[in-house]
Image (cartoon, rainbow, N blue to C red):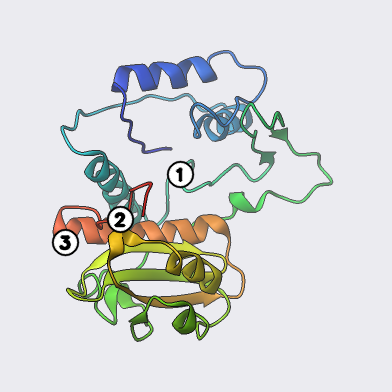
């Protein structure tokens, strides 16, 4: 159903999630645990009961999150789909609660209302091929690399898709991303400092409009494969400041 990680003790995090779900007549808020609303919706609709397992990891925050991505990637490779409660996936007949501050409680959709798009099936996992940064990595047709400048970004095709940022000197991939508007996201990235590194970018447009969880699934396939190859996450992947 869900694979997660935490910077706190696993016991504390799981107990918090259990308390969010236990005997709740209303869908929990999206905080402090983002998976709670989705787990609640599946329980409410299908009467699922949950069990859990955990493992301690003595890793940096970056590589703990990289390990989470790797596990989700391996799950997708083996099952050919994602877990039901990762990547923003949700029960098709329910809406999701916001956080407490926004104060909008989710719940079951009325019969006349269309399904939640987050309830669409997973997109097929990317096929494992090449090495991170190759022009055909994961059997995608990556664009030729260009310097991450506003002038170069203006040449990017319109649409939703995936992109890579790499060190212009070493050519090593330092960040993997996805966006509903790749050109705009790359323009935003071109205005950041990135520790004063000179970066280059490459991208793959998937389509004019792509469900959000599909983009996140494909992005995670790339991060997971990167971790599988290099045993670490890209340099800037899980850093707050860039």
Q: Give the secondary structure at mark 2.
A: loop
Residue occupying the point 46% across, 63% down: 178
User: Splitting the image into 4 quarters, where does residue 65 fall?
Assistant: top left
Q: Quadrant of the N terminus?
A: top left
Q: Which residue is mark 1?
A: 86
Which quarter of the image is occupied by the C terminus? bottom left
- Secondary structure beneath dot 1 equals loop
In terms of secondary structure, where does tag 3 sit? Answer: helix
Q: Can residue 75 be seen here? A: yes
For the point 53% across and 47% down, the residue is 89
Left/right placement of residue 20 relative to residue 241 reads right
Q: Residue 23 location in percent, x, y?
A: 58, 13
The image quarter containing residue 98 is top right
Closest to the observer: 20 or 78?
20
Find residue 112 and report its horizontal and vertical position in percent: 84, 46
- Look at mark 3 in the image and give the residue it sits on: 229
How would you rate the neighbour count of disc 3 (Cα within 10 Å): few for under 14, some for 14-19, many for 20 or more? few
In this figure, which residue is indicated by the disc labeled 2? 236
């Amino acid at each position: 159903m869900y694979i997660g990680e935490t910077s706190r003790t696993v016991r504390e995090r799981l107990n918090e999630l259990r308390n969010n779900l236990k005997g709740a007549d209303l869908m929990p808020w999206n905080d402090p645990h983002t998976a709670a609303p989705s787990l609640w919706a599946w329980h409410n609709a299908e009467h699922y009961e949950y069990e859990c397992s955990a493992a301690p990891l003595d890793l940096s925050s970056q590589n703990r999150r990289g390990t989470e991505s790797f596990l989700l990637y391996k799950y997708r490779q083996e099952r050919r789909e994602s877990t039901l409660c990762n990547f923003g996936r949700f029960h098709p007949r329910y809406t999701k609660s916001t956080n407490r501050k926004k104060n909008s409680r989710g719940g079951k959709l009325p019969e006349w209302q269309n399904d939640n798009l987050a309830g669409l099936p997973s997109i097929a996992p990317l096929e494992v091929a090449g090495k991170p940064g190759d022009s055909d990595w994961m059997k995608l047709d990556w664009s030729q690399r260009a310097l991450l400048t506003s002038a170069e970004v203006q040449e990017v095709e319109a649409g939703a898709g995936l992109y890579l940022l790499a060190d212009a000197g070493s050519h090593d991939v330092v960040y993997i991303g996805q966006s509903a508007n790749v050109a705009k996201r790359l323009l935003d990235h071109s205005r950041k400092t990135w520790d004063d590194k000179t970066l280059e970018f490459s991208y793959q447009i998937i389509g004019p409009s792509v469900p959000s969880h599909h983009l996140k699934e494909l992005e995670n396939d790339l991060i997971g494969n990167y971790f599988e190859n290099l045993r670490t996450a890209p340099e800037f992947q899980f850093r707050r400041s860039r």
